[in-house]
Image (cartoon, helix red, strand yellow):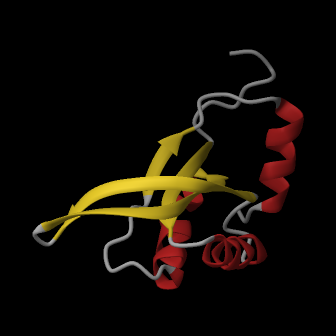
């Protein structure tokens, strides 16, 4: 592993939300609490899923919460409290590598 990688220290917590406003509110809360270095919000998502006995198609936004692996559980717990969905998707995705200067910044932005 080169000096520009820090494999396994950071993860994304992925979730979908009903609007940019809701995603921004969650992102602000997680960053302020030092549970996330950054939250990327992607509008324009279209989701198709089954809920109850019907297939639902809805507009959503995706949020990628950048945090330390050691904080993923706490970040997901905080996100769940802020999440408007009854059963939110809160999925942890590994970050295998990254540039050292960005990861140093992210490390300083998060607790621990």
Q: Identify which residue is drawn at 40% across, 55% down.
A: 47
Pick whichever, 87 or 70, lies toward us: 87
Quadrant of res 37: bottom right
In the image, residue 4 sits, relative to residue 17, either above or below, namely: above
Q: Residue furthest top?
A: 2
Q: Identify which residue is drawn at 49% across, 43% down.
A: 93
Q: Quadrant of the C terminus?
A: bottom right
In the image, residue 10 sits, relative to residue 55, either above or below, namely: above
In the image, residue 39 sits, relative to residue 26, either above or below, namely: above
In the rendered image, residue 46, in percent from the top left (x then y), is placed at 46, 54
Q: Identify which residue is drawn at 46% across, 50% down.
A: 92
Q: Residue furthest left?
A: 53
104 with respect to 82 (left or right): right
In the rendered image, residue 43, in percent from the top left (x then y), is placed at 63, 57
In the rendered image, residue 35, in percent from the top left (x then y), is placed at 67, 68
Pick whichever, 81 or 70, lies toward us: 81
Marks counted in the figure total 0
Q: Is residue 64 visible?
A: no
Q: Is residue 61 visible?
A: yes
57 with respect to 5 (left or right): left
Q: Quadrant of the N terminus?
A: top right
106 with respect to 15 (left or right): right
Quadrant of res 49: bottom left
In the rendered image, residue 104, in percent from the top left (x then y), is placed at 85, 43
């Amino acid at each position: 592993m080169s000096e520009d990688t820090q494999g396994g220290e950071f993860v994304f917590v992925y979730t979908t939300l009903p609007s940019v406003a809701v995603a921004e509110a969650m992102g602000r809360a997680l960053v302020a609490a030092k549970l996330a270095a950054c939250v990327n919000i992607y509008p324009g998502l279209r989701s198709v899923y089954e809920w109850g006995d019907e297939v639902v198609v809805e507009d959503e936004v995706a949020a990628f919460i950048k945090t330390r692996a050691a904080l993923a559980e706490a970040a997901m717990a905080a996100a769940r409290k802020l999440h408007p969905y009854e059963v939110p998707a809160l999925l942890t995705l590994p970050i295998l590598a990254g540039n050292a200067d960005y990861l140093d910044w992210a490390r300083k932005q998060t607790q621990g």
